Amino acid sequence: MEKKNIDWANLGFGYIKTDYRYVSNFKEGAWDAGVITEDDKVVLSECAGVLQYAQTCFEGLKAYTTEDGKIVCFRPDLNADRMVDSAKRLEMPVFPKERFIDAVVQVVKANAAFVPPYGSGATLYIRPYMFGSNPVIGVKPADEYQFRILTTPVGPYFKGGAKPITIKVSDFDRAAPHGTGHIKAGLNYAMSLHAIVTAHEEGFAENMYLDAATRTKVEETGGANFIFVTKDNKVVTPKSDSILPSITRRSLIYVAKEYLGLEVEEREVFFDEVKDFAECGLCGTAAVVSPVGKIVDHGKEICFPAGMEKMGPTTQKLYDTLTGIQMGRIEAPEGWIKVIE
């Protein structure tokens, strides 16, 4: 298929309308067959459940062109599993895992002309999402839902390389104990907007959220999980019931153990010990790993030995190995790569 006439090398990380999207509706207790459509408009009642009580969840994954020219997705089964967990927690109907993966395949195939070529640094971002669609005025779950998948070509998250960022310890809480921090609910991101806008106004790239109960343990940033490296080259990731289980983090842990032979600890990470780590990064779908050079805690600076010029050496190896797997340069573990065409 002939690719669209897009300046792939200069794409930003934003929305560009593609030709097709996937839509399925849940009514009278069942999902319909679902369709691929050119219509990008969502028409809702003014009283739709999603508009009144924020009953919505979403996922994010990417399609790539590999070195040998195939179009692939990275571990869509885990996105499907996570959306099942989100739906259950929000009292929404589960969109079946097999149908989720099939819908991703359908919509990527339909938009194959928008999948950037290998070596361009760009990818096709895929956004599955679900929301309550019928009128709801009492505080209760909706009765009808819509599941959709949109796609958009995006450039690399970092232009000109992944320079270490400076973040701050937030005065706000991201998630309450026993709340919704462990699922990908839209409401989690709405409540984080004021905190991130405030951080940006103060000159910081992101927030470090501590646990709401004791404010002594590291959780996440709201959009990414943390990954630390100790001075003796051990990989450490925070563990908490209110952290979103990042698929990228899970993959990096496997890469650290099985590809790089590193020791890995998934455990509670106390903020007091952060100053003793050699490297720090944020991991997620968009950038894979964003290196952190400095954390500011109310005027007190924690500067990592890896510095502010480039990724630390272990973080760089993790990044290179995982992106190599995604792009087909390194052999992937069984089941990690879903070939679209």
Image (tube, rainbow, N blue to C red):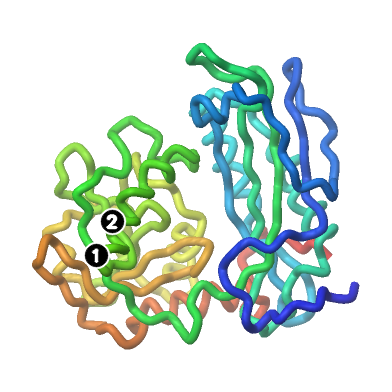
* Badge 2 amino acid: Thr
Label 1 neighbourhood size at 10 Å, few (<14), some (14-19), many (20+)? Answer: few
| Position in image of residue 80 (x %, y %) | 63, 44
**Is residue 308 depicted above or below 265 in this figure?**
below
Q: Residue at x 17, y 54 (%)?
A: 270
**Is residue 179 depicted above or below 157 in this figure?**
above
Q: Nearer the viewer, residue 25 or 288?
A: 25
Q: Are marks 2 and 1 in contact (CB under 8 Å)?
A: yes
Residue 236 in sight: yes
Q: Quadrant of the N terminus?
A: bottom right
Q: Residue at x 59, y 42 (%)?
A: 81
Q: Quadrant of the C terminus?
A: bottom right
| Position in image of residue 326 (x %, y %) | 62, 71
Question: Residue under circle 1?
Answer: 202
| Residue 125 quadrant | bottom right
* Badge 1 amino acid: Glu
| Residue 93 quadrant | top right
Q: Is residue 260 left or right of residue 88?
A: left
Q: Residue at x 22, y 49 (%)?
A: 210
Q: Nearer the viewer, residue 237 or 56?
A: 56
| Position in image of residue 245 (x %, y %) | 44, 48
| Position in image of residue 202 (x %, y %) | 24, 64
Between marks 2 and 1, how big is the CA–CA gap? 6 Å
Q: Secondary structure at mark 1?
A: loop
Residue at the extreme right? 1
> Which dot marks residue 102?
none
Q: Secondary structure at mark 2?
A: helix
**Is residue 221 depicted above or below 187 in this figure?**
below
Q: Residue at x 27, y 66 (%)?
A: 167
Question: Residue under circle 2?
Answer: 198
Residue 234 in sight: no
Residue at the extreme top? 138
